[in-house]
Amino acid sequence: MRELYPWPVLARVECDTQYVGRTQIIIYAGVEYKVTLKSIRWQPPHGTFKYRLLVESEGIGWHARSFYDEYDMCGAPDGTFVTLFHAKKEEPLEKIAKAFFERKWENIKSESFRSLAVSRFLAASITVEVAELAFRDVRLEHYPDSRLVGGESPMLASGRDLWVGHRFFSEDAYAWARRNAGSASRVVALYFADTKYQFRTDLPSGAEVQSTTQLDSTELRGQYADLILSLLRGLEIPTETPPLEQLAPIVSGHIHAPYTPVSEADVHEALASLKRSCDSKAELRYQLAAGVVLNAWIEEERRHGFSQRKSFYAFKQQIGALVKWATEANLPGVHLWVEPQPGRATPIL
């Protein structure tokens, strides 16, 4: 939590008595912060000064979180920094997390919710809960040096038997697993979103990488699926899916639907969905639709000159597995057939 405090901004604040009650304008990374030194108090038991600071900022889009928070910064008489902590017992991010995990979407304000800091904090929180439940037969402890972003320490550990690390993107998860292989008998790196280009996926013995979606699906039956999807879609607050009868005319071609470009959120959701276990007609429909989305995205990217996107055709292996499962399951109302296509060597399912 503390690593998400506005450290670079607070480091630039003037804390002399002449600045008490005055607002200081600090520009950092293109964002304007208003910082007011509200009070200075001497703390005899600690031999330090405590500075109460109010930080205000509207933020700018995804990369800058909004602030209206008070912090207590402690310093030695010679001006040396000692420590910093939030003035309230419950930090705003904790309030957001509480509403998020309780799925009380009406208590979440989109302007304070959709930011990179919130995304990374919630991703780490979900990963911890999923890992603790999935590895419940192992006594896991929170590693003292763990960080939300960067660092080499695991998030959870069971001595030297098991290390569980977390990265948001798959490429970073593979890199972390390679670097830490051998630190424990088993090293597991969990990630949220697939990196959308080709990267190294080789791993030494004892190291493995899984998506949080996959672990949640196989071990917890999708207990956190809606929360994970919210993060994959850039912190979209979940909404109800239209009934299938409303979508059927569009799918069958009886109603014309306007062209909609495939977004980054669509790609993240589609790649993650194909890592889920399939055990129902609804899930089969969802995963096949994800395959259509990925196919459209790859073709669009290749038209724009990104030929390396062809590596993502590996997802079609999962489509084959889905078709095999659907054939063997003999689901009512599901009909599979192939059609020859002009100019193609193989028919289309």
Image: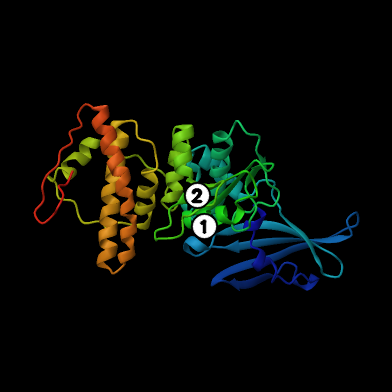
The label number, if any, that marks residue 313 in the structure image: none
In the image, 64 versus 170, the foreground residue is 170
User: In the picture shown, does residue 206 fall above or below 298?
Assistant: above
Which of the two discs, 2 and 1, labels the residue nearer the N terminus? Answer: 1
Q: In which quarter of the image is residue 238?
A: top left
Residue 129 % position (x, y):
57, 39
In the image, 108 versus 2, the foreground residue is 2
Circle 2 residues within 10 Å: few <14, some 14–19, many ≥20 = many
Colour scheme used in the picture? rainbow
Horizontally, residue 289 falls left or right of residue 45, namely: left
Circle 1 is placed at which residue position? Answer: 172
Q: Which amino acid does label 2 sit on?
A: Tyr
Q: In which quarter of the image is residue 229?
A: top left
Q: What is the CA distance from the residue labelled 2 to the residue labelled 1?
A: 8 Å
Circle 2 is placed at which residue position? Answer: 191
At horizontal 71% and vertical 52% (from top left) the residue drawn is 87
User: In the picture shown, does residue 201 fall above or below 247?
Assistant: below
In the image, 315 versus 280, the foreground residue is 315
Marks 2 and 1 close (CB-CB < 8 Å) = yes
At horizontal 54% and vertical 59% (from top left) the residue drawn is 65
Residue 181 % position (x, y):
60, 51
Do we see residue 206 in this rendering? yes
Do we see residue 122 in this rendering? no
Q: What residue type is labelled 1?
A: Asp
Q: Residue furthest left?
A: 342
Judged from the image, the secondary structure of the residue bearing numbered disc 1 is: helix
Circle 1 residues within 10 Å: few <14, some 14–19, many ≥20 = some
Residue 64 % position (x, y):
53, 63
The quadrant the C terminus occupies is top left
Q: Which residue lies furthest to the front in this view?
A: 205
At horizontal 66% and vertical 46% (from top left) the residue drawn is 90
Residue 83 % position (x, y):
77, 59
